[in-house]
């Protein structure tokens, strides 16, 4: 007879707090790069100015999309117990 196995703690998804922190770090890094692009706009001459300007304009969109993307849970799905049957008190007809 096969022994039932429980869900390992490593197969559980990340907690909402950890996931939120990871998304905030991604967003903060992207906004930091945007600040560098804005600063580069003041010192870049000629047509080269378009590169940091495009970075400063387009980066917020990608930062928001990356921050709002929820990561797929790592590991397998959490196993649930077998079928739950409704309780019928003795002496009643179902």
Image (tube, helix red, strand yellow):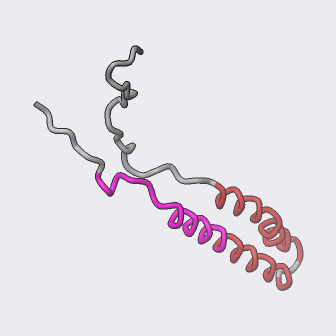
Quadrant of the rendered image containing residue 56: bottom right
| Image point (20%, 39%), residue name | 4
Q: How many marks?
A: 0
| Image point (32%, 37%), residue name | 81
Q: Which residue is outermost to the top?
A: 93
Spot occupied by residue 42 in the image (x, y as percentages of width and height): 86, 84
- Residue 59 versus residue 15: which sits nearer the camera? 15
Indicate yes or no whether the magenta region holds residue 51.
no
Magenta: main secondary structure equals helix
Horizontally, residue 55 falls left or right of residue 86, namely right
- Residue 54 versus residue 7: which sits nearer the camera? 7
Quadrant position of the C terminus in the picture: top left
Quadrant of the rendered image containing residue 68: bottom right
Q: Which residue is outermost to the front?
A: 91
Indicate yes or no whether the magenta region holds residue 22.
yes
Spot occupied by residue 76 in the image (x, y as percentages of width and height): 37, 45
| Image point (58%, 53%), residue name | 70
| Image point (85%, 74%), residue name | 49
- Residue 64 versus residue 36: which sits nearer the camera? 64
Q: Is residue 18 above or below residue 92?
A: below
- The magenta segment is 8-28
Q: Which residue is outermost to the bottom?
A: 43
Quadrant position of the N terminus in the picture: top left
Spot occupied by residue 90 in the image (x, y as percentages of width and height): 32, 23
Q: Which residue is outermost to the left?
A: 1
Q: Is residue 47 above or below residue 43?
A: above
């Amino acid at each position: 007879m096969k022994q039932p196995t429980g869900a390992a703690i490593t197969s559980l998804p990340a907690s909402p707090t950890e996931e939120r922190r990871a998304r905030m770090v991604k967003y903060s890094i992207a906004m930091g790069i945007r600040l560098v692009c804005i600063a580069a706009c003041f010192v870049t001459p000629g047509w080269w100015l378009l590169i940091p300007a495009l970075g400063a304009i387009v980066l917020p969109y990608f930062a928001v999309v990356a921050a709002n993307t929820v990561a797929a849970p790592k590991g397998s799905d959490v196993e649930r117990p077998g079928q739950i049957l409704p309780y019928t008190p003795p002496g009643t007809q179902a």
